[in-house]
Every structure is written in C-alpha cells, then in structure tokens.
Image (spheres, rainbow, N blue to C red):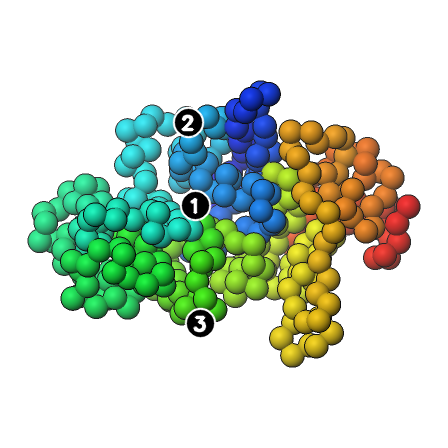
C-alpha cells in the first residue's frame, strides 16, 4: 500500500539576489513498511527535500508540488492539521541530537511531552510508554530523569529514535542519524533502527552521503544531484550495477575493505557540484561526467525506465544513446 506520494516537489530559498533552487521536480513513492535511502553529496538537496515533506523548512523557503501522505496533500493543508500529522503520523530523527534535544529538560520528560499532547493521555501513562521506548533503544529506566549532556553521542541518538517513535508514527524521516558517531556506535544504532523498523512496520526515509549505510538499511535507494533525482531503484541493484555515472562515482569513492588498491587510491570525483542558481541547459552533471555526450549538454534530463523498478536520468540508458562505458564525445 502506498503511504507517501511526492509529485514534482520543488524547494527554493530567498537570498540577496533573488531565489536559489534547492530541490527541482522530485517525484517518488514510498510504500507502508518500506525503507528508502536518499544519497548524494553535500548540497545536493537531500535534507531540503526530506524536511519539506513535513514543512519543517525555515520561513524563507518556498515549496511547490504535492506531498500526498495517505492521500492528503501536506503542502496545502492547514497548520493545525500539520501539527497533528507531525509526531502522530510522521516524525523526524535529526542529524545533531544535542541540538534537537532541550538541554534543560530531562530526556524522559521530552519523550512524554508529545505522547501527552498527541495521544491525550495522562502523565502516568505517558511515563509508562516513555520507559518502554527507552528500554527498546537500550537506555535503562534509571536514566529517565537524566539530561542530554549526561549521555554519550550514541545514547543521545538512541533517545532521539525513542522520541521519533513516541506516538507510533507510520513514517520516520532520519536525517543522517549516524554521521557524528564512531563506527562501532554507528553499527549499533543502525542495527537498532533496523530492528525497530521490522518490529513496528514503519516506513523510513533515511538521508545519508554514505552508500554503504544506505545499502545496509534500505530496500530502495534514490540518488540526488543538484536538487534532482538522477537514479532510483532497489538498493542491491543500484549499488551493484549503477546506471548513472554519478551513482557509479559515489560507489567508487569508498575504499573496499581488504582491497589495498582501492584503499590506497580511492576513485573520487573531481570538481564540485554546480551552483543551482546558475544551472544551464542539459544535464547538470555533464561538466563532471566522464562519459558525457554532446546531447547531454542540450537535452533536458528526466528519469527514464532502465529495468524492473529502476529509473535513471542519463541518456546512456536510452537505446539511441547507449554505448560502452568509457566512450565519450
């Protein structure tokens, strides 16, 4: 069953010279209980796209398109309805837990607050639920009254996950939830997330620049570049056989454990993402693409079907432009 439908979503921000686009025409679907990973370099529009789904962007942002959550367009609904959707139907795990948590309020009380507000229960019932949530993420009940600064980074991230699940939402948006953690704690948090998703049956959108993390966690992957989706498909297929040159470059940028050659000379991607305020015609990746064609700089890109459940915004997936990798003009 389709839970979320995003149609032609666009986000822009006002700056000194006018408006700068951050997300350009993103469309995707998410089913109940499905996990979708969103990858891309910094500035590719991942976080802007994700936070716009629940209208959590700053006041200067402008959005257009449709975000249909169980058939209801969240971009056009009233603010009172949006407040009801947040927490109870959809929630967010932010990247910096210390910045997201109230430093002068015990973590247990912070978990209780949305439960009492949205589930309309008393303090005792909310405390019982909060203790259950803390236990589910591996935080002892004795830490209910502790403050955020008394927890390690990994523990604070666990508290954030508990808060996100407080009102039993159908969708959780996780914005790079493990970026600030060391690899051991990251593995623990990811396993915890996977277990909770399986047990609760919730849908997840996970934002990360780390394809290895997304491949481990997600059923499907969406790759963004310069505010647009450039590839979408099952995670195993997309990582193992990318159809867009940018996805291939992201995959090669990570050294392979046990492979000395890749460790000593990881294959990155030269150059920087373009300024979205000054994008020209054609494919925005063409200036950095090793297999760009002349037509790539002229023809408008869109997501073309390139297999079962797969799409890529690259002319190379079309029969009339297909050519061996490495050939360019």
Residue 154, image quadrant: bottom left
197 relative to 229 in the view: left or right: left
Res 167 visible: no
Residue drawn at (71%, 58%), measured in percent from left and top? 268
Crowding around mark 3 (Cα neighbors within 10 Å: few <14, some 14 to 19, many 20+) is few
Mark 1 near mark 3, Cβ–Cβ under 8 Å?
A: no
Front residue (pair 71, 202):
202
Mark 2 and mark 1: Cα distance apart in space:
27 Å
Count of numbered circles in the view: 3
Residue 147 in picture, x, y percent from top left: 22, 55
Q: Which is more N-terminal, label 3 or label 2?
A: 2
User: Label 3 belongs to which residue?
Assistant: 184
Element carrying mark 3: helix
User: Label 1 belongs to which residue?
Assistant: 3
Mark 1 and mark 3: Cα distance apart in space:
33 Å
Front residue (pair 93, 147):
147
Q: Is residue 293 above or below residue 325?
A: above
Residue 145, image quadrant: bottom left
Residue 87 in picture, x, y percent from top left: 30, 44
Residue 189 in picture, x, y percent from top left: 40, 65
Nearer to us of marks 1 and 3 is: 3
Crowding around mark 2 (Cα neighbors within 10 Å: few <14, some 14 to 19, many 20+) is few
Crowding around mark 1 (Cα neighbors within 10 Å: few <14, some 14 to 19, many 20+) is some
Element carrying mark 1: strand
314 relative to 72 in the view: left or right: right
Say which mark, if any, is on residue 59.
Answer: 2
Mark 2 and mark 3: Cα distance apart in space:
38 Å
Front residue (pair 159, 129):
159
What is the residue that sits farthest to the bottom in this orientation? Answer: 258
Res 45 visible: yes
């Amino acid at each position: 069953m389709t839970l979320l439908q995003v149609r032609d979503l666009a986000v822009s921000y006002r700056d000194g010279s006018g408006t700068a686009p951050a997300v350009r025409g993103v469309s995707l679907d998410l089913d109940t209980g499905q996990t979708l990973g969103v990858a891309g370099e910094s500035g590719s529009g991942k976080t802007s796209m994700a936070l716009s789904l629940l209208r959590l962007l700053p006041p200067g942002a402008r959005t257009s398109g449709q975000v249909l959550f169980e058939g209801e367009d969240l971009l056009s609904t009233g603010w009172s309805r949006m407040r009801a959707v947040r927490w109870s139907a959809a929630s967010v795990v932010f990247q910096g837990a210390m910045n997201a948590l109230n430093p002068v309020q015990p973590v247990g009380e912070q978990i209780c607050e949305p439960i009492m507000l949205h589930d309309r229960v008393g303090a005792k019932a909310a405390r019982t639920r909060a203790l259950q949530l803390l236990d589910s993420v591996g935080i002892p009940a004795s830490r209910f009254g502790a403050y955020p600064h008394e927890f390690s980074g990994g523990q604070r991230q666990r508290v954030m996950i508990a808060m996100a699940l407080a009102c039993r939402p159908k969708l959780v948006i996780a914005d790079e939830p493990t970026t600030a953690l060391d690899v051991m704690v990251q593995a623990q948090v990811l396993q915890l997330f996977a277990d909770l998703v399986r047990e609760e049956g919730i849908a997840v959108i996970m934002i990360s620049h780390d394809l290895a993390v997304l491949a481990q966690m997600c059923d499907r992957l969406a790759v963004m570049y310069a505010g647009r989706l450039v590839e979408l498909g099952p995670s195993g297929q997309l990582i193992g056989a990318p159809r867009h040159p940018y996805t291939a470059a992201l995959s090669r940028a990570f050294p392979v454990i046990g492979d000395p050659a890749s460790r000593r000379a990881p294959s990155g991607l030269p150059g920087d993402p373009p300024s979205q305020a000054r994008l020209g015609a054609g494919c925005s990746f063409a200036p950095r693409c090793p297999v760009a064609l002349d037509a790539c700089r002229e023809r408008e890109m869109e997501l073309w079907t390139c297999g079962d459940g797969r799409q890529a915004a690259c002319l190379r997936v079309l029969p009339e432009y297909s050519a061996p990798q490495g050939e360019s003009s």
